[in-house]
Amino acid sequence: MKRTLLGLAILMAAASLDAQQPAAPAPANDPIRTLVSRLDLEKYKATVKGLTAFGDRRQGTTRNRKALDWIEAQLKSYGCANVERITYEYKTNPPRTGGGGGGGGQGGGQKPPDPIIASGEVRSGPGGSRYRGTTRRTGVNNDPMRQPDEKLRALNSEPAVDGERQDVYCTKVGSTRPDEMYIIGAHMDGHGWGEAANDNGSGTALVMELARVFSSPDVVTDRSIRFALWNNEETGLNGARAYVEQRQKLQGKEDPPGSGRYPEPKWLGMVQHDMMMWDHGMPRADGTWNPEQRPEADVNIEFQSDSKHSDEAMKLAFHFRYANEKYATDYPAAVGPHMTNTDSGAFQDIVPSISLRENERGMHTGAGWNPTWHQPIDVFATFSDKDFRLGLNAAQTTLSGVAQLANARLK
Ligand SMILES: [Zn+2]
């Protein structure tokens, strides 16, 4: 049997996780399997649908603030403890020339994207990635008239105004290690004159669904888990950066002393979710796309090989890949080293950080393989059950992966 270097790296990662990852088949009373079964396609779809009621949820607008209120009310209704917000100021930077900044990619893009056929030269994408095959132009739609639904156009018409912004989060408090936590995140803002159903209603709903399952009164975890919904990702990860700035220094401090309460448990890892549903493959040579989910669709788990904690982040990525193999019902997961352009970037040099997505952010998303990205067609009605099911499988992956890490069980 030939062993490649990567193969060896995988084996080493596997060996180091043996303690948490028994190879034997799960017993029938595996509590993690029970928790995974509490996720459900219809509930996931309903949560995405709920978010789309607030249009594209652009930062700095009433529709964004109303979405935040709705998310908070949902988290409370799940019984998630200590729903909290952090507040920060956001001021628009003067536009940069040369593009490429921000979270999801800024810029004009008023015309429908054109196909560009690969000519074989090496073209690099973000995060250390390399484009291959057919690419399509990407950008953020700024043209209201490209939204044919008049009601949605009106809902999205209020422009962003600089000023106060908020993130919202809630926490499952660990029973024996309340001073340590994993952060499970997604950004709740969007743009492009659609409903931001995929970017990022799909990730926001995933985090909310996990908050629901872990908040059930019969679930106990050793370590804490925080469910965080970031604002201002699309303007450059500003909500996640504000969280890091305000709370990094509070980690692991008991407050008040002797209370057993840790407002900011020590960060053990950060798992971000951003665009979870669309994996239809490479665009066709004429620039059109496959209308259905490709049967080979997968969840892409990425770490950043250039980050301070890249080795641990790689192990964390493979931990979630193994969790997928054991617990996800339909779609597999793949690991890549080019995590980029999402809120986990704000954490990657502080703690091991990974992102879960429908595609690799560089090689696939950056190459324009998701035609709904920041476009008016990013609405609930665009997506089929096969698309929603990919998001559900990512939810199964993160739920089971973090349940193992936090040692979740049933009372
Ligand atoms: Zn996004």
Image (cartoon, rainbow, N blue to C red):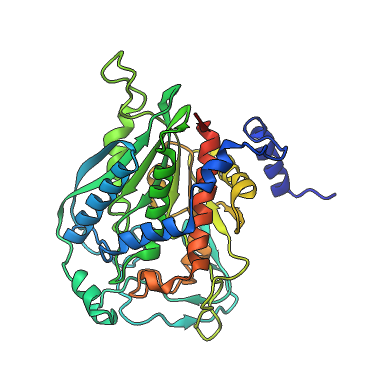
How many numbered circles does the render carry? Answer: 0
Q: Residue at x 46, y 66 (%)?
A: 366
- Residue lying farthest to the top in this orientation: 258
Q: Position of residue 181 (x, y in %)?
A: 42, 32
The answer to whether any part of residue 311 appears in the image is no
In the image, 23 versus 158, the foreground residue is 23
Q: Is residue 228 left or right of residue 135?
A: left
The x and y percentages for residue 193 are 28, 72
Q: Nearer the viewer, residue 257 or 346?
A: 257
- Image quadrant where residue 49 sits: bottom left
Image position of 329 (left or right of 226): right
The residue at 31%/64% (across/down) is 52
Q: Is residue 120 left or right of residue 362?
A: right
Residue 183 vertical position relative to residue 276 in the rendered view, above or below: above
Percent across and percent down for residue 284 are: 55, 81
Residue farthest toward the bottom in the current orientation of the protein: 286
Residue 15 horizontal/vertical position (percent): 69, 35
Q: Nearer the viewer, residue 248 or 58?
A: 58
- Above or below, 35 relative to 290: above
In terms of depth relative to the viewer, which is nearer, 248 or 331? 331
Residue 347 in view of the camera: yes
| Above/below status of 187 relative to 16 | below
